[in-house]
Amino acid sequence: MAKAQWDMALRPAGERWAVPNDARGIAPLVDRLQALHPTLSVLEAPGGLERAATAAWAAAGLPVVVVHPRPAREVARATGPWAKTEALEARALAHWAAVIRPTPRPRPDAQTHAWRALLGRRQPLMVMRTAAQHRLAGTSGRLQTDMAAPLTWRNARLATLDDDLATTLRASPRWRENDERWQSAPGLGPVCARTLRRELPELGPLTRQQIAAWVGVAPLHGASGTLRGRRTMWGGRAPVRTV
């Protein structure tokens, strides 16, 4: 999908069509999909542009899964063609969905979306504040006042975001209970607990081996034939490892 339109591909019929990415296109698309009775609907995650459509699909009772765009693109490269168009990407995504059969999961509610948006805004502000502090340490006195002004603004915004996050957390008894349980672990504070809630919703039902692989801290095999290479950790979710 893109800002302008949705490109759909149907398997095994091979049918393909496109609709505008707005209310005029999403409503007829939901009606058409309901008439087809699909066993699975898979779409790539383009950075939030899919939220309106997935909410409409979930409200209509359609099974939908949002996946990272990379797996479908790797399938397209492996099976050909090498060209890249919206139609080809839609077919590759449908092919990947038919083979892999990802499991639909419950969609986050409005409160969870608001929580994730607040925490998502906090992370880049922290990165910018840290970079500004490093630059300020090596700057002459004449420029320090000018560089300190945006740093003061970022500190104020971070304080406001932390208050908003705490207020949102207290509004949900279930969130508050999980937050207290996580922070009971030695060395785990409120920022880490909030990051786990946003970046690692799978925490809980998975085993310790599975959750370690999702985060990217599981030692993975590097063997081939008679070679027994070192086990290394890679992939996963960098924001979780950072905190």
Image: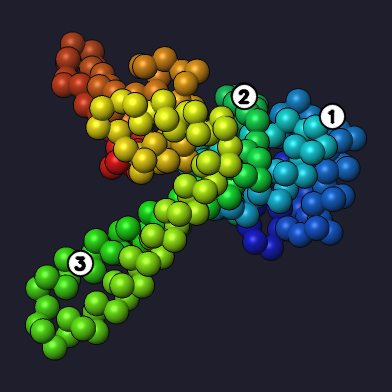
Residue under label 1, please give it.
37
The image quadrant of residue 186 is: top left
* Element under disc 2: loop
Q: Which dot, 2 or 3, sits closer to the camera?
A: 3
Q: Nearer the viewer, mark 1 or mark 3?
A: 3
Which sits in the foreground, 160 or 231?
Answer: 160
| Label 1: which secondary element | loop
Q: Earlier in the sequence, mark 1 or mark 2?
A: 1
Q: Is residue 186 above or below residue 45?
A: above
Q: Amino acid at mark 3?
A: Gln
Q: Residue 113: x percent and y percent?
A: 59, 47
Alpha-carbon span between mark 2 and mark 3 = 44 Å
Q: Amino acid at mark 1?
A: His
Give the x, y percent position of residue 8: 73, 45
Total numbered labels: 3
Kindly identify the residue that appears in the image at 23 percent across and 69 percent down. 132
Residue identified by numbered label 3: 133
Location of residue 149 (image quadrant) = bottom left
Residue at the disc numbered 2: 103
Q: Residue 179: x, y in percent?
A: 44, 33
